[in-house]
Image: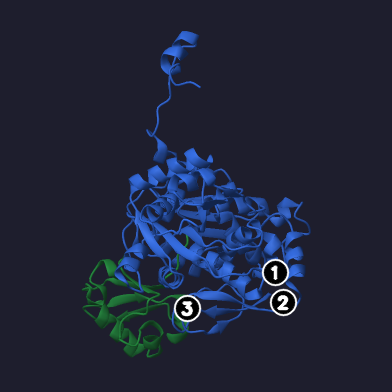
């Protein structure tokens, strides 16, 4: 089974307009690598020079921020949903 | 000064002045960039400001509206919206004395239409939203913003949608619902509400989410706090400012307001030392500052200062940078210190602030106690909201004398201390 990745509007120009991608991977890192393999332009948009996530990129696994889990090493179960969103806040 | 474009704070990519908030290239936040077209003399510009209306629109030259202040006249409140800003700056001499300081001023933003500084940012965001033709206002809120959006939408005759965490203070829920908004209480914390709204804003592109797709304009409204402080100090700068931190937007924009006016020559002097204030129960920015990091590890909030309970503060990295650069700091205080802060301000100034204000007062007390403030400094404490919104924080902090309606009963209860 695959993992579903939800793509925010700001990144859809790099996915040919697709809002959802279906990729394989057992960890967040693997899922992202697979995603970048499908949509090459995404890598430089959300990854920094060291290969980590840029500081204003938030990734959620089933609604939970991966920084509360194991970051990009977080295990991703089959059929799970990853959501990429920009960091934005203001009470 | 006219707004010229939106510019990414991270990579510098520019965008048109539309409802955009994130850089498509690097996900960095977008900020309004102005063209400094001011060529006249300083005295003329100051007179122009002083001749303006007694609200945020007196600073329209420094705000990102294409068509100037809204409404044909500010007397027509229904067209111009709620008149936010121009709140009192009070010389808190008794508070200063208590803390062993020379000069402390309180910028009392509880004196806004819905009793918090959020009326400023909503005024600017909703005016820009109307220029861009939006049909509805919306927001993710820790409470104060919900009050402001619901009220502003009512004044403008726009539908509104306010999303709040379900565990919010009752006063803030009542003070939002009363304006006839669509109030959505989400089972989750603010960061979860915010995530939902970020997703929703993509689905409802005809809604102006004031703190999401309108965020670059919204945030500019906070600069008016700094402009007012300068004007109210007689065109002078404070030496230090204490500002509470939730997302960090207010902190960075208060500084920006000072910096812009220094750059334009409207005020002379060095930029104020910026001190940020957080609650220990939600201190991602203070933690990062203490650890010397330039990013904020998110936290799960657990504090009575719910209006500051943002565990994933978008402007955190910029706050840290500014606090360091100006010689300030970001400190965190406990819930007990917050309660003491509320009482201290109330007893020395007559101003009853909400928990967020208690955080600022408590941080000021801490800095003074630790000797980190030069006694000769002029300090401004930014009080962002009203104590009537967080009544639970003071419950049990004092006792009323309940007596029978007789002189004897009064004498028995209070005769020994009455003056």
Q: Are marks 3 and 1 on the same chain?
A: no
The reply to whether residue A1 is visible in this rendering is no
Residue name at image x 31 percent, y 58 percent: B300
The color chain B is rendered in:
blue
Residue on which the image places disc 1: B61
Could you say where residue B178 lies in the image, as x and y percent from the top left?
A: 56, 43
Q: Nearer the viewer, residue B349 or B279?
A: B349
B145 is higher (above) or lower (below) than B220: above
Residue on which the image places disc 2: B38
A81 is higher (above) or lower (below) than B410: below
SS for dot 2: loop
Residue on which the image places disc 3: A10
The color chain A is rendered in:
green
Q: Disc 2 vs disc 1: Cβ atoms closer than 8 Å? A: yes
Could you say where residue A56 lies in the image, as x and y percent from the top left?
A: 40, 75
Mark 2, other Cα within 10 Å: few <14 / some 14–19 / many ≥20: few
Mark 1, other Cα within 10 Å: few <14 / some 14–19 / many ≥20: some
B356 is higher (above) or lower (below) than A6: above
The reply to whether residue B176 is visible in this rendering is yes
């Amino acid at each position: 089974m695959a993992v579903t990745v939800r793509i925010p509007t700001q990144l859809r120009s790099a996915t040919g307009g697709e809002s959802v991608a279906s990729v394989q991977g057992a960890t967040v890192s693997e899922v992202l690598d697979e995603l970048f393999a499908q949509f090459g332009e995404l890598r430089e948009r959300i990854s920094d020079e060291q290969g980590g996530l840029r500081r204003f990129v938030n990734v959620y696994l089933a609604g939970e921020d991966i920084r509360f889990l194991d970051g990009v090493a977080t295990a991703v179960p089959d059929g799970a949903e990853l959501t990429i969103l920009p960091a934005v806040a203001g009470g | 000064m006219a707004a010229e474009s939106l510019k990414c704070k991270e990579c510098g990519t520019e965008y048109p002045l539309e409802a955009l908030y994130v850089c498509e290239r690097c996900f960095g936040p977008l900020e309004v960039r102005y063209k400094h077209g001011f060529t006249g003399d300083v005295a003329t510009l100051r007179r122009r400001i002083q001749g303006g209306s007694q609200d945020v629109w007196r600073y329209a030259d420094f705000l990102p509206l294409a068509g100037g202040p809204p409404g044909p006249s500010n007397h027509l409140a229904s067209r111009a919206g709620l008149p936010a800003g121009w709140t009192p700056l009070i010389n808190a001499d008794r508070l200063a004395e208590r803390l062993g300081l020379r000069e402390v001023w309180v910028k009392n933003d509880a004196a806004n239409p819905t009793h918090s500084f959020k009326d400023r940012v909503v005024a600017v965001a909703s005016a820009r939203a109307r220029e861009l033709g939006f049909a509805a206002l919306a927001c993710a809120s820790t409470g104060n913003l919900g009050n402001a959006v619901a009220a502003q939408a009512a004044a403008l005759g726009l539908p509104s949608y306010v999303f709040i965490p379900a565990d919010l203070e009752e006063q803030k829920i009542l003070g939002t619902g009363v304006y006839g908004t669509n109030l959505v209480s989400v089972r989750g914390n603010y960061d979860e509400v915010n995530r939902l709204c970020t997703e929703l804003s993509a689905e409802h592109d005809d809604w102006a989410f004031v703190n999401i797709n309108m965020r670059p304009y919204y945030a500019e409204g906070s600069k008016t706090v700094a402009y007012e402080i300068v004007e109210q100090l007689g065109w002078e700068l404070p030496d230090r400012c204490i500002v509470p931190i939730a997302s960090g937007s207010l902190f960075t924009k208060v500084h920006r307001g000072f910096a812009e006016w220094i750059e334009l020559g409207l005020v002379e002097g060095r930029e104020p030392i910026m001190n940020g204030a957080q609650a220990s129960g939600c201190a991602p920015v203070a933690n990062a500052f203490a650890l010397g990091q330039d990013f904020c590890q998110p936290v799960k909030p657990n504090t009575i200062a719910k209006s500051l309970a943002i565990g994933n503060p978008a402007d955190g990295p910029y706050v840290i940078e500014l606090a360091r650069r100006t010689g300030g700091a970001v400190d965190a205080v406990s819930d007990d210190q917050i309660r003491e802060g509320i009482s201290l301000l109330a007893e020395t100034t007559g101003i009853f602030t909400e928990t967020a204000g208690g955080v600022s007062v408590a941080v000021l007390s801490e800095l003074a106690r630790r000797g980190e403030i030069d006694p000769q400094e002029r300090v401004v404490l930014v009080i962002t909201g009203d104590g009537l919104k967080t009544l639970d924080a003071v419950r049990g902090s004092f006792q009323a004398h309940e007596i029978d309606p007789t002189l004897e009963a009064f004498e028995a209860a209070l005769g020994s201390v009455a003056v």
